[in-house]
Every structure is written in structure tokens, then in C-alpha cells.
Amino acid sequence: MSANRTLSQLLQGEATFTDDIAPDNLHYGYTVRSTIPKGKILSITIPPLPEDYICVDYKDIPGKNELHIFGETIPFLAETTVHYIGEPILLLCGPDAFRCRELARQIIIEYKEETPHFSPANAPEENIFDTIVYSKGSFSNVKKDSFTTIEHTYTIGSQEQFSLEPHCAVSLWNENSIIIYASTLYPFSIRNNIALLLGIHKKKVKIIVPEVSSPFGGKLILPTIIAAHTSLLSYISKKPVKILYSRKEDIAYSFKRHPAEITYITITNNEGSLMGISADITLDSGAYKLSSQNILKKAFLSAFGRYQCDHFEFKAKLVKTNKVPSGYFSGSGELHSLFALELHTYKIAQTTNMDPYMWKKKNIIVNSGNYSPSYPAGPYTSSMAVLDTVVKISDFLRKFGAYQAIKKGRNPLNELHTPLRGIGLALCPHIIGDFYEKESDLYTIIVRLGKNRKLKIMTSLIDMGTSKSAYFAMIASRILNIHISEVIIEKIDTDTIPDTGPTINARAVYVIGKCIEQACELIKQKEKKKEYPIEIKKKVNLLPKKKKQAELTHFYSPTTTWESTVIEVEIDPVTFTTTCRGIWIVLDPGPVINYEIAREHVEAAAVQNFGLACMEVLEFKNGIVYQNNISEYTIPDITSVPEIEVQFIQRESHHKYNPIRGLGDQAVIGVTPAYISAIFQATDNYFTSIPCTHESIHRFMGNRT
């Protein structure tokens, strides 16, 4: 694959997606799911099946009925118990997809229902998966002093991944091996899990990844389950099998962003300085914990931002509920904590009679080094640079002051005839280069230079239309003095590429980019001997105790990059309709390779978080997703989002070729607190939940008038 893949290839239909794979004699799979949220399976009655149709359950699995992901284990098919509505129990397969659905409706499953728990608030003690407790200084003693104490509880709703392409997998069993086409961000997870499922060696499993649309994390875990189901059906039927989720199935059964409830208590002195801070976080894991423990860890690391304070207190728990599991979602953990924290600081600034910019400037830490509680700072920081820049380009100080003055002198709401306006500000650090504690501690990239001086880079990272491939090619081109067109990024095929781990934006550029840089430096040294081809395998050690062969192994530590966001809103005093007047975002990712692609990446993240802030309502009623189709689950469109102004600031770096840290797991997470802060200034009501919908504002404004 060329490093210069463009969007036009996708728009012109030149790209091949998983659903485009259609082998001869293709059969279609369908998943029969639990219809109760919790209970035991007593009996299953299957109707007579036509010729060429099969139905399988967990007893038909030749290997292990276990999905292993990030150190956690869940069953591919339920055995004797079910834990949420939609949990897979049976798989049907046949030459006609519609007929499979008809047969599924004829299957009768009897259960012994048990009492489900749909909210962490009423879940029993045994439903607590994990906890984190941390303290520094003496928050309780500071609380006794006569300072200003502010306490609020914030809630973050669930959110659908809403992948641009359907979830799909195609499997082809061939005597003693299998080929799987899957839209995934983690091909080697599929390979390893299918080998366990079918009881065969990993070398007998080949994963090919066609084009993958940008899914913000939705293609990390679920594709492994779908691939396992198609593989089992293909293994038993000896036919190629495809499973394609409809949009309704996707919304109903795919893994969501973790809902959360977060309580902050802050203590400030008369000058507005932060004296103590306490955070209490509850994350709803759903029926299984999957990546939830790592999300909890990131929420902990982000809970105190980067504000100067000597007294901290942190409690967090991860709770099981009988709902669709929450899974990996770009920005999760960071987004939860920083939404609540940044919105809370807006309230602090108001209480201490300071504008949000001055309060942040007074309390932010500007020196390098570790800070609260163990956040990676890196050799330099740029928090004030991004903050000052976004305040300037948005004209924040003038607008904030003007809107405050207007609010103080305006008539009661029922007498207003002019729009209400507000403006919000957020400052968010992003952890770059982190990893999941229970994933593999060693990943590999391969770089090979041929005699014709064409370079091949082999990695299992998925590009998804972002600039990762272009960046890798740029690094190699500069070091080896070859044209960028001579750099080839190999297609994703587990037979030919090494395991580079899951594609997670927070480390793809910062970690893997450095490995490619070092590999190219070694090639440059060895090229003096003119002995081709020259191949370098570079390993990424996540744990220092595993470090071996210093010249071929790179151990990295996380660092920080910064984002600051301003949002301006306007509310009609009659209809209470909210309009977003502008979004300004400033980031410090290091030097930018392709401004157009980087800006598109930032804008996409901003739009996704804008949806979470004000419109993407995803409710569960008795364990069932209520908004289960595209007409009921509202996402932002071109009419609801204004023009987004994005700027990247540049700063000096000690890296010769690879000064880039990247845009983080999710490029923008400050949209949610900035939006709610703007609503707060406009309405003078402190909304503490997202999404804060038009209906929420209408209810409040209607009551006030």
C-alpha cells in the first residue's frame, strides 16, 4: 500500500471493504441472542433445518470458548447463563441470509430469570469489578479550614461508536487452515483467539484486513467476536461464511462508551488558589469488563488535570451491570475525568469572581516533571501556549466579559427578545504513548531495504485514512535519503507482517514512529557495506524489566500533549433552540506532516464529542437500547456544527527526525466541558450532565419563564 492513499480512492469506489468480499458458494451467518438480561438457560428447541443450514452452540466449539482481550476473558457463546440482552447463544448459517433470520425466530429458548441490575447505584457489592484509591497530602484536614468548598456530581451518558462501515467478517475454512477477512484494528488478537477457538496452531490462521473506516475504537474488540462466529460456522459447514451486522444490530449489541458518575469536591482559598481536590468516579462496565480496567486507570491519571495542588483524594470503582458491555472508545477515561474537572473549574472561577482563563493561568503548573498524581509530563510543556492562543483567536476574554455584563443587566427570561449567548473554555492534557497493563509486553516492526533502494515497512497498525502511513514514510525518507514514493507500507496480512499490537492513536505515532526511526538509522549504518537486502526487526518493550538486546529494542515512556478548546453558543429566547456559533481548537502535537489530514482528524473528533455534548442520547430501558436505529439515535450533521477553526502550535524538540507526539487517543476532548460551560453562562443554570440536549435546556428555560 502506498503511503499516499487519498480520500478520493474511497469516494471513487476503488477501496475494498470487508463486505465487498464475496467468495463462491458464500453462506451467511446469523446470531441468536439472549432475550433476558440475566438468568440461566434451561432448554433450547431448534426447528427442523432445511438442507445446507446448520445451527451451532458452545458445545460445537472444537477448542476453547474464550475471547482473550487485554487480559480479560469472556465467552464467544453463552453456555449456561446469560448476563445481558443480546448475549450470543447460538449461530445459524445457510445460503440465504433472510431464511436464517426466519429460522432464528422459530428457535425457542427457555430461561430461569434472575434479578438484573441496570445501574451501578443499586448493584450489590459482588458486582464491583475493580477499585482504585489514591491520596496525597491531607485533603480531610484542608477541608476543615475555612476555605471555599464546591461539590458537584457530573454524569456522562453512553455513546454509540457509529462506525462508518458495517461490522462484518468473512471466513474461509480450507481443510486444516482458515483465512479471515475482517474490519479490525487488532488483527493479531483475531488470529490468536481463532486459533484457541478452533484448537489449531496460530500459523494455520490468516487474517487479511481490507479498508477500515475511522471508527474511534469501535473496531478493536467486536470484530474478534464476529470473526470467531464466522470461523466456527465455516469450520463446521466447510463453506465460506459472512456475518454482516445491520445498523440496528450494531446499535443494539455493539460495545458503548462507559457511562459514568463523577463527584468532585474542591477547596480554594480567598485568592482562588486550589488547596485541595477530591474525585469519586463510578464507571458502568456493563456485563463484562473487557478494557474497562484500563479506562478506569486513564480516568485516574486524568482526574486532577495539571493543576497545582498539594492535597488530593481519589476513589474510583468499576461496576458490573446487566447491559451490553462497555468497551474501548477513543478518549475514554480521559474524557470522563476532564469533562467533569474542566466544567468544575468553570464553577470555581465563577465562585471566586475570576474569569476561567485567569483562574487556569493562576493554577496551572507550567514547569516540567511529574505532577498530580503521576501524570507523565515529558521534558517540556506547552499548556499556556495552547491556552493563550485559543483565547486570542476566539476573542474569548472580550466575549466572556461582554456576556457577563449583559447577563447581569438583562430582564427576566420571559421578557427577553434578544438571544442569550455564552462562551466556554477548556484546557485538556492528553496522555501519549500509554499502553494497557494486561496486553502483550512486546511488539515488533520490520523495516527492509532492497538493492533497488525501495523500502518496505511492515507493521500491523491500521491507517484508517489518517496520516500514520505518510508519517512513517516521511521518517524513512529523511533518514535514508530516498523519495517518499519508494517507501511501501505493506498490506495487513498476518502471514507476512509482525504483531505491532492494537491500533491506538495515543501511541501509534509516538511509539511505533520512534521504532521505525531507530530501525532506519541502523539500516543507514549497515548500508555502507552494500549488502542487500538489509532487514531490521525492531521490538517495542512495554516493560523495562523485559528489555533485551539494547540495539534492537526500544523501551518508551509516556508523555503529554495539550489541547485547548473554546465554544460559543446562542439560545433563542422564544424557541430555546441552541445554536453553536463557533468552535476554536488549538493543539500541540509537535510538527505536523499533513495539515489537511491532521485538521480533518481533529474536526472528526470534535464533531463526535459535540454529539456527546448535546444530542447523542443513548438510553437503556430494562437492559434494552431504546434508540436502536439511525432515526432515533441523532448524530451531528453539517447543519448543527459550525465551522471549526483549528490551529497547531510548534515548539522546539530534541528529536532530529521524530519530534511528533501525535494527537492523542482522541484528538479533542475539551468540546464537552467547553460546550456545557457556554450553556452555563448563557442560561445561568449549571447543567452537569451530558448530553445536554435541546429538551434539557427547553425544560429549564420553560420552568424559568
Image: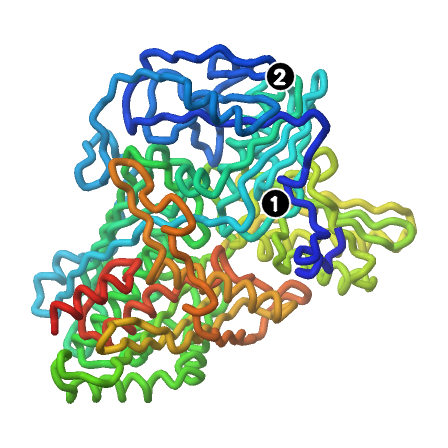
Which residue is nearer to you in this view: 188 or 20? 20
Residue pictured at 17% horizontal, 66% vertical:
700
Looking at marks 2 and 1 on the same chain, the residue that comes earlier in the sequence is marked by: 2
Image-quadrant location for residue 376: bottom left
Q: Residues within 10 Å of mark 1 (few under 14, many from 20)?
A: many
- Kindly tell me whether residue 538 is visible in this rendering: no
Which residue is nearer to you in this view: 195 or 705? 705
Indicate which disc residue 237 carries.
2
- Kindly tell me whether residue 462 is visible in this rendering: yes
Cα distance in 3D space between marks 2 and 1:
40 Å
Q: Is residue 80 above or below residue 396?
A: above
Task: Quickly name the residue at label 1.
Answer: 540
Which residue is nearer to you in this view: 351 or 156? 156
Which residue is nearer to you in this view: 221 or 108? 108
Residue pictured at 58% horizontal, 66% vertical:
598
Residue pictured at 72% horizontal, 52% vertical:
14
User: Which residue type does callout 2 highlight?
Assistant: Ser
Q: Give SS at disc 1.
A: strand
Residue 324 left/right relative to 378: left
Q: Is residue 109 above or below residue 628?
A: above
Residue 238 locus on image (x, y percent): 66, 17
User: Which residue type does callout 1 highlight?
Assistant: Val
